[in-house]
Amino acid sequence: MVLNTKTRIISLIIFAFLFSILIRLIPVYQFNDTEHLKFNNEFLISTGDGYWRAEGTRDLIAGFHQKNDKSIVDTKYASASQLTAFIMKILPFQLETIIFYMPAFFSSLIVIPIILIGNSLKRLDMGFVAALMASIAWSYYNRTMVGHYDTDLLNIVLPAFLLWSLILAIQTKEDKYLLISAIDIIIYRWWYPQSYSLEFAFVGLIGIYIIYQFFKKQDINYNLTLITFMLIAMINLDNLLKFIIVVILFIILKIKRDLFIKYLSSLYILFAVAFFLFIYTGGIDPIILKLKGYIFQSSTLTIGGLHFVTPMQTVREATSIPFDLFANRISGHIIIFILSAIGYILMVRKYPVMILTLPMLGLGFLSYSNGLRFTIYAVPIFALAIAFLISELSNLVKNNILKYSLLSILTIAILAPNIKNVIDNGMPINLVKDEAVVLDKLKGIANREDYVVAWWDYGYPIRYYCDVKTLTDGGQHTGYENFLTSFILTNKQSQASKMMRLNVEYEEIKYAKHRGGTHISNMASDYGFKDINKFLTSLQSDIKLPKKTRDIYIYLPERMFNTYHTIKLFSNINLNTGVKGTESFIYKPTRYREDTETIDLDNGVVVHKKTGKITINKKTYFINNIATTFYDKNGKLQSKIQTINPKASFNVVFLSKEKQFFVVDNSVYNSLYFQLFILENYDKSLFEPTIITDIAKVYKLKI
């Protein structure tokens, strides 16, 4: 029985869709019995931003949230939360289960536009192979695997549908693709407000084509109408209003077509109005801002004459990556990447309409110098390219059995390294079960109006599990915001505690009085200091603090120690001059060897027991403190501290239970984080322990 084209398309879509989902379930099978990856009988979310969206879903389901709590429901980024809340109403599953499996289902929809693109080129075999490849390719899989609850689950699906509609619009000049393209842009903008860059690139490319047609004296009416519909969909107005406008415009087009085509001036006027409104409503502004953020990067940011460290330099997603990693993330292997590049050139040469893929490919290639996060945009394009090459090679074989055998073998060959990545990638999570347990316990202690201070990485999970307020999170961690949190975590308890109270109360003042400027500048001004450094020094004294309006807790996870260098970077700067301070010394050996004379900590670091000295990089120094921690019969952590030379710069700490050594300089040793987490040596007048575990500790501020 010979299937008709429509049936074949549907069958291939279903097969590719199920293939994509089944591959994404491999980690579930691998780690189903790994309890530390689960909480509330479900796997934990694997991305920090996912907790922000999960928090928003929780708030939407509850129907309320506290004022100024930074919930996503008050922003333009609530689409994933809205979709999840809707699914919660129609499916009988708990929130954690829906959140965990949503990425696998929705990201697998990528196979539909890919197969449809192949069909539009009369190359259904090419579309099918490309769909299999695109659905599980390294980068796309990593950002859409189960548990990766983020907008990525549709961030490529929607532009792929837009690409399909634009290809058919250019090919067929059918009116329906004007409406489909516009509606896709509106949905894409609702789902992912940052979509303007890619949309603008598509508009620009079609605009160039229109100019080419104009000089070649070709008919530009349809393409000018297409770009007009796209611009209207991109105007910075309410999405529902834009939808109504494009639908009305489409109806007018169908009923009174002569207004658009016969009288060219009407079409030109409509285009001019759409373009003007696009610019007037800030259509270019986000693109310029994005260029500043990702291309014109700077290590420091100056605000009000003060110099802050920009976080862009510390975010791996926004930094350059090696070429082999770049190639692997797009195609799974560097050889497949090179063949895909060849296939792309040949594909565009044979099907010039595929030049429309350039915006997505170009955005994907930005990853090479501006961070791995964009590689997913190139995945479906190079999947089409390698599929085209495989299809062309297979078509050289005239025997059908041999032809489809070759097609299958080559398809398996390009899928294999990507499936291996799935198996090797495991089940990454943003925090482990024991951390979630601590935060869930804190929810029963803290009130909704209380603050939990932590490094920004933990902001979203804290708000999701504890339902409290935070100062920084994955979306609010500019240099001046990070400065204050960094100052708290890396300075002595006396200074850090005052800054905790100041930071929280000034955060509330910002909302109550709509006060602008940075908190640190406002603090210095209110305390009568023109020199910001003198204000920071004054925190060592007994200054009068703002009236306490709520409780404050500080969350200190064990794994934060691994990022201490990065955390310190944000406050280790002279705010007046921008000059960065001396880098802290932290050494955590993975193993050690001990004899009667020395403790060899590897990498040339040796502790000399009898002399109380330490050798680092072939230089020998006196040791300030040698601290050994142990647990008493009541299970409470105790510290035995021996001071060797108070003027020395290095300290040696040994955790007897963990058999772990640390070598740190005085700034690290005396920091709030090290004293409260590693040594549990807290100032009883400033802090009180709230939750103490090996994996995370929570203290309550008493002042």
Image: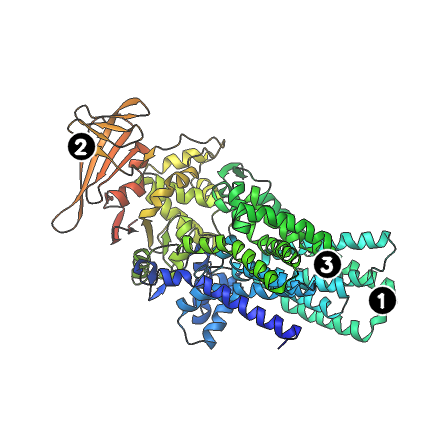
Along the polypeptide, which appears first: circle 2 or circle 1? 1
Q: Which picture quadrant has residue 8?
A: bottom right
* Image location (x, y in percent) of residue 320: 53, 41
* Nearer-N-terminus badge (1/3): 1
In front here: 219 or 671? 219
Q: Nearer the viewer, mark 1 or mark 3?
A: 1
Residue that protrudes farthest toward the left in the picture: 633
Q: Which mark is residue 15?
A: none
2 vs 1, front mark: 1
Give x and y (percent) for residue 473.
44, 52
Above or below 154: residue 665 = above
Q: Amino acid at mark 1?
A: Ile
> What amino acid is at disc 3?
Leu
Tell which of 546 and 606 is nearer to you.
606
Instruction: Please give the label number shown on residue 642.
Output: 2
What's the mark number on residue 277? Answer: 3
Q: Residue at x 19, y 38 (%)?
A: 628
Please, is residue 553 above or below residue 445 in the view? Answer: above
* Location of residue 483 by image quarter: top left
Name the residue carrying label 1: 261
Q: Secondary structure at mark 2?
A: strand
Q: How far across and down, in percent of the image, does residue 131 sit? A: 57, 61
Whether residue 650 sits left or right of residue 517 in the image: it is left
Amino acid type, mark 2: Gln
